[in-house]
Image (cartoon, grey):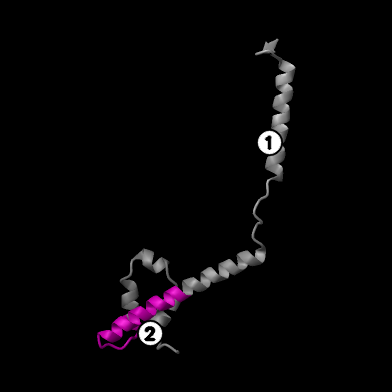
Amino acid sequence: MTIRGRSAVQVAAASLVLAVAVATAVVLWPTPAAPTHEQISEQIKASAQAHEDTSLLDGRKAQLAILNLGETPSEELCKSLWDRKTTAEQHAMDPYMWMTGCVEAPTQ
């Protein structure tokens, strides 16, 4: 039996050689190094710190808005502003850091 002038054995042998070449290329292809445990840990810490910083900054903005109205920031007033935030806004922030930013005077 022939396939366009070639025997089935030749076609099978060529297919096998091609398959081995492709498999070798896949196995030997360089891959980027996976991040180390320390790198992942640092990324998580940086993300958590950014979350806290963003929450504190947003609380400071609320404090500034209260001061611009001639009011004194208090826990009750800041709590009422917090309660007016949407659920999505509240979930995106750290409530403790936001309240700290709203109620307490900046230390710097």
- Badge 1 is on which residue? 22
In the image, which residues are magenta?
Answer: 53-77
Left or right: 101 in relation to 48: left
Q: Which amino acid type is shown beneath numbered disc 1?
A: Val
Q: Position of residue 9 (x, y in %)?
A: 74, 18
Viewer-side residue, 91 vs 3: 3
Left or right: 84 in relation to 16: left
**Who's the residue at 36% across and 83% down the image?**
75
Question: What whole-number distance in Å separates the C-alpha atoms at marks 1 and 2?
Answer: 64 Å
- Badge 2 is on which residue? 103
SS class, disc 1: helix
**Who's the residue at 42% across and 67% down the image?**
92
SS class, disc 2: helix
Left or right: 40 in relation to 13: left
Q: Position of residue 68 (x, y in %)?
A: 27, 85
In the rendered image, which quarter contains the C terminus? bottom left
Q: Main secondary structure of the magenta part?
A: helix
| CB within 8 Å, label 1 to label 2 | no
Residue sitting farthest toward the left: 69
**Picture quadrant where residue 59 is located:** bottom left
Callout 2 crowding tier (Cα within 10 Å): few <14, some 14–19, many ≥20: many
Residue 66: tell me if it is visible. yes
**Who's the residue at 63% across and 66% down the image?**
39
